[in-house]
Image (cartoon, rainbow, N blue to C red):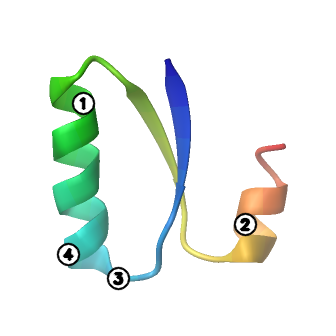
Amino acid sequence: MRILLVEDEPEMVSALRAALKRHDMVVDHAGTLIEAEGFV
């Protein structure tokens, strides 16, 4: 499964990305809503 994580706090991004990857998920990251729009 692929997930788009929209989060601007680097520490939260690291923690969430690690947790999701442990469940075999592919994580794309955007720091802002404008960046996220480029993924959809």
Q: At 28% across and 47% down in the image, what residue appears?
A: 17
Circle number at residue 9 = 3
| Residue 11: percent from left, percent from top | 20, 75
The residue tagged with tag 1: helix, strand or loop?
helix
Assess whether mark 4 and mark 3 are in contact (beta carbons under 8 angstroms).
yes
The amino acid pointed to by label 4 is: Glu
Is 1 above or below relative to 18?
A: above
Q: At 17% across and 44% down in the image, what residue appears?
A: 18
| Residue 12: percent from left, percent from top | 25, 71
The amino acid pointed to by label 2 is: Glu
Q: Cα distance, mark 3 to mark 4?
A: 6 Å
| Of the pair 16 and 14, the residue shown nearer to us | 16
Q: At 46% across and 81% down in the image, what residue appears?
A: 8
Circle number at residue 21 = 1
Circle number at residue 11 = 4
The quarter of the picture where residue 26 lies is top left
Q: Earlier in the sequence, mark 1 or mark 2?
A: 1
Label 1: few (<14), some or many (≥20) within 10 Å? few
| Horizontal arrangement in the rendering, residue 21 relative to residue 22 (left or right) | right
Q: Cα distance, mark 4 to mark 2?
A: 18 Å
Q: Earlier in the sequence, mark 2 or mark 3?
A: 3
The amino acid pointed to by label 1 is: Lys
Rendered-image quadrant of the C terminus:
top right
Is 31 above or below relative to 21?
A: below
Please name the residue that numbered disc 2 is placed on: 35
Q: Cα distance, mark 2 to mark 3?
A: 14 Å
Q: Cα distance, mark 1 to mark 4?
A: 16 Å
| Horizontal arrangement in the rendering, residue 12 relative to residue 3 (left or right) | left
Q: Cα distance, mark 1 to mark 2?
A: 21 Å
The amino acid pointed to by label 3 is: Glu
